[in-house]
């Protein structure tokens, strides 16, 4: 139920693209069946057989710059600079960056978590990149993305070059560890604590990874999709309003 | 409460005061660890500072937050994209329109309709945001004055803000928590009389700002409390992710309105005030100058206001109903009700579907940022293709800036901690969300 069946997206880029896209689409996880939240035999909507799949996160190919979209003007320059800069370090570009996504005028580098700390240092220090400002990290939980359930998303801004990029990395639920980048961007101290608090992502190397928004003795990580939501007990014959994720809905 | 006394340590973070005093007398310790907050009038809401004091000197400052966490980001995952504005407006309750604007820009980016927002809607957005910037800065200075004991500054600041809130009430129906900026445009057009009221503000406000400046600019007391206090230079700002007036007070003219214009900010003439003092006074001067620049922008907004729609011309996204003021308050306009109830069955179905189900947003993720009164307010939104957000995260400037309390306060006096926190201008609703 995952991309390529193994949780590894697009290992062989550039091979027979359209057909592969179709196959990936059919192997991508089912996001929803039916419509209007009807799940019982009373489904008269006529949409009972509908299968809505999650979109396939296809990586973008060079060039990243679309001449018709001014927002993408510097994307190729950033990618070139990153490739050049990573050439100097042990972790080369191909080992670091799994895929690149250009969408809605935004550039996203999906990177392997092991290479994250080195990559961030390069992004901050390289004169051609100079992403001085890190706008924090936040988690996103994709329970269906087997092997990559927890994503950590970093937004970076270069004041020197007036560019912004996004760096995304992931870890499985079973091993929720991502290296901390507080040593590179001290501002991420609280942001990483928040991502730990809400998603249970353990940022290895963080100076003091404690809860920040929830009480210290809280159990669970509330913004995960599998976090149990409470129903509201109503004083009428023991009835209970179901939790929001179990109510009838349109999504 | 523990009264364990170690060699140089007294825990005075609560408990029986007599026991604390006895413990202090029994040892030669000079160091105190005290809680300031979460219920303390000068900590801007429920902010908790854990200070280690050596006499009057603060040797360690830690910040405890989370007392106002309301789970807004989680709640939004179970409401439609339009209903999200009602939640985000309550985050940083002093800058509701910035919250709404950041959120709506992110949703519009996901929908791919950024360029199709009507011109008039964009002008109204800028107009409201600049008024909101002034309101927020007035509260920043008012609370700051109160915390330093200058109650005139406090009453003046809130009086000035009230003029702006009156305009908000006239335009949106509410003083705070407006939910006025919506994906696709704004909830309703400016009512009759709004432009006149804003012009009146433009005439009156420069005088009020002058009064505020006379009170504070060169007041020896104010200078003594703010000059060279809570120093944070440019390198510190960059490392700690500090933006907004704090960054501009350390000498960098960085403003998203100039660097990454949104809502048509590239069409307005204004300056970015900068100071290189890096201290509390410099931050005050920057905020004061920003008030004057905001007035300039508001004036240009009124000149640019041309008649036209205020909601996107796309029936699949734009809110179907027009609001109108009836005898029982603000509600759907009688024309619209007559149309859907008596005229067109299809219009009724359309209204019902769009209001209850909402519009679908193509899957993907987007980040949109605005220069709020406090700094870069970013909204990161993820859609899975449904009618509700899959995940929304806000990068609130107050949250990020509070991390700099330790850098600003350690080594200073206790009194300077108050000035430092006030100069950050944190709002706990935004910090904790």
Image (cartoon, rainbow, N blue to C red):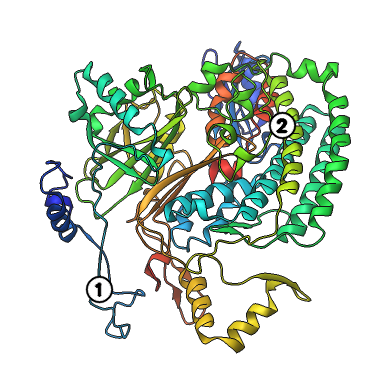
Give the class, few, some or many, for how many residues have Cα within 10 Å of label 2's Cα (few <14, many ≥20). Answer: many
Instruction: State whether residue B391 is above or below residue B285.
Output: below
Residue placed under numbered mark 2 in the picture: B290
Q: Are marks 2 and 1 on the same chain?
A: no
Query: Which residue shows up at 11% across the image and 41% down it?
Result: A12
Seen from the viewer's position, the closer of residues A183 and B376 is B376
Q: Quadrant of the N terminus of chain A?
A: bottom left
Left or right of A129, for residue B67: right
Residue A166 horizontal/vertical position (percent): 37, 36
The disc label shown at residue A50, or none: 1
Q: Quadrant of the C terminus of chain A?
A: bottom left
**Residue under the image location 69 percent in, 40 percent down:** B133
A135 vs B328: above or below: above
**Callout 1 crowding tier (Cα within 10 Å): few <14, some 14–19, many ≥20:** few
Q: Chain of mark 1?
A: A
Asked whether, in this view, residue B348 is left or right of residue A136, the answer is: right
- Residue A74 relative to residue B203: left or right: left
Q: Is residue B142 visible?
A: yes
Question: Which element type, helix, strand or loop, lies under badge 2?
Answer: helix
Q: Residue at x 65, y 37 (%)?
A: B373
Q: CA distance from mark 2 to mark 1?
A: 54 Å
Question: B40 or B131, which is in the foreground?
Answer: B131
Relative image position of residue A203 (x, y in whole percent)? 33, 33
Residue B1 placement: quadrant: top right
Q: Give the percent coordinates (x, y) of residue A139.
A: 37, 43
A196 and A99: which one is in front? Answer: A99
| Quarter location, residue B129 | top right
Q: Secondary structure at mark 1?
A: loop
Q: Position of residue B257 (x, y in %)?
A: 59, 36
Can residue B2 be seen from the camera position used here? no
């Amino acid at each position: 139920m995952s991309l390529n069946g193994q949780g590894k997206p697009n290992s062989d880029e550039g091979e027979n693209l359209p057909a592969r896209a179709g196959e990936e689409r059919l192997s991508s996880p089912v996001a929803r069946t039916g419509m209007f939240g009807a799940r019982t035999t009373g489904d008269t909507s006529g949409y009972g057989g509908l299968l809505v799949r999650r979109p396939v996160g296809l990586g973008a190919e060079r060039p990243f710059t679309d001449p018709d979209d001014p927002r993408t003007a510097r994307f190729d320059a950033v990618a070139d600079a990153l490739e050049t800069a990573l050439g100097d370090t042990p972790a080369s570009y191909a080992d670091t960056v799994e895929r690149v996504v250009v969408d809605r005028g935004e550039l996203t580098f999906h990177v392997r978590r092991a290479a994250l700390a080195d990559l961030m240092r390069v992004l901050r220090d390289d004169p051609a990149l100079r992403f001085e400002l890190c706008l924090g990290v936040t988690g996103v939980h994709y329970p269906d993305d087997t092997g990559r359930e927890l994503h950590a998303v970093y937004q970076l801004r270069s004041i020197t070059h007036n560019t912004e990029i996004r760096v995304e990395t992931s870890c499985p639920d079973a091993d929720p560890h991502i290296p901390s980048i507080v040593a590179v961007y001290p501002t991420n101290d609280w942001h990483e604590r928040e991502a730990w608090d809400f998603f249970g992502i353990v940022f290895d190397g963080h100076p003091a990874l404690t809860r920040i928004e929830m009480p210290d003795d809280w159990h669970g990580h509330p913004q995960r999709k599998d976090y149990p939501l409470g129903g509201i007990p109503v004083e009428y014959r023991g009835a209970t309003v179901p939790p929001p994720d179990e109510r009838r809905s349109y999504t | 409460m523990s009264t364990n006394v170690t060699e140089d340590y007294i825990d005075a973070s609560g408990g029986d005061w007599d026991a604390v005093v006895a413990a202090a007398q029994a040892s030669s310790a000079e160091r105190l660890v005290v809680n300031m907050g979460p219920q303390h009038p000068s900590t801007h809401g429920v902010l908790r500072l854990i200070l280690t004091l050596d006499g009057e000197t603060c040797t360690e400052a830690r910040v405890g937050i989370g007392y106002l966490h309301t789970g807004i980001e989680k709640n939004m995952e179970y409401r439609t994209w339009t209903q999200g504005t009602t939640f985000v407006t309550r985050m940083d309750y002093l800058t509701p329109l910035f919250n709404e604007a950041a959120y709506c820009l992110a949703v519009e980016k996901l929908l791919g309709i950024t360029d199709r927002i009507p011109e008039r809607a964009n002008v109204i957005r800028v107009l409201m945001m600049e008024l909101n910037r002034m309101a927020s800065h007035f509260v920043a200075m008012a609370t700051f004055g109160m915390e330093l004991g200058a109650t005139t500054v406090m009453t003046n600041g809130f009086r000035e803000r009230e003029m702006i809130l009156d305009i908000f009430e006239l335009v949106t129906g509410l003083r705070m928590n407006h939910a006025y900026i919506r994906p696709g445009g704004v909830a309703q057009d400016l009512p009759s009389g709004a432009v006149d009221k804003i012009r009146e503000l433009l005439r009156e406000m420069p005088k009020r700002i002058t009064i505020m400046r006379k009170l504070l600019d060169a007041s020896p007391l104010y200078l003594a409390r703010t000059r060279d206090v809570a120093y944070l230079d440019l390198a510190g700002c960059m490392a700690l992710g500090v933006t907004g007036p704090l960054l501009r007070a350390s000498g960098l003219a960085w403003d998203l309105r100039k660097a990454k214009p949104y809502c048509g900010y590239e069409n307005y003439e204004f300056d970015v005030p900068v100071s290189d003092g890096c201290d509390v006074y410099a931050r005050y001067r920057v905020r004061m100058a920003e008030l004057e620049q905001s007035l300039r922008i508001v004036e240009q907004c009124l000149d640019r206001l041309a008649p036209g729609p205020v909601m996107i011309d796309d029936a699949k996204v734009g809110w179907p109903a027009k609001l109108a003021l009836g005898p029982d308050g603000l509600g759907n306009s009688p024309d619209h009700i007559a149309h859907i109830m008596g005229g067109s069955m299809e219009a009724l179905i359309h209204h019902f579907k769009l209001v209850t189900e909402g519009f679908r947003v193509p899957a993907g993720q987007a980040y949109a940022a605005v220069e709020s009164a406090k700094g870069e307010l970013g909204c990161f939104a993820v859609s899975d293709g449904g009618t509700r957000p899959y995940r929304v995260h806000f990068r609130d400037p107050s949250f990020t800036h509070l991390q700099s309390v330790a850098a600003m306060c350690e080594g200073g006096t206790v009194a300077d901690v108050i000035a430092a926190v006030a100069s950050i201008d944190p709002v706990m609703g935004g910090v904790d969300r």
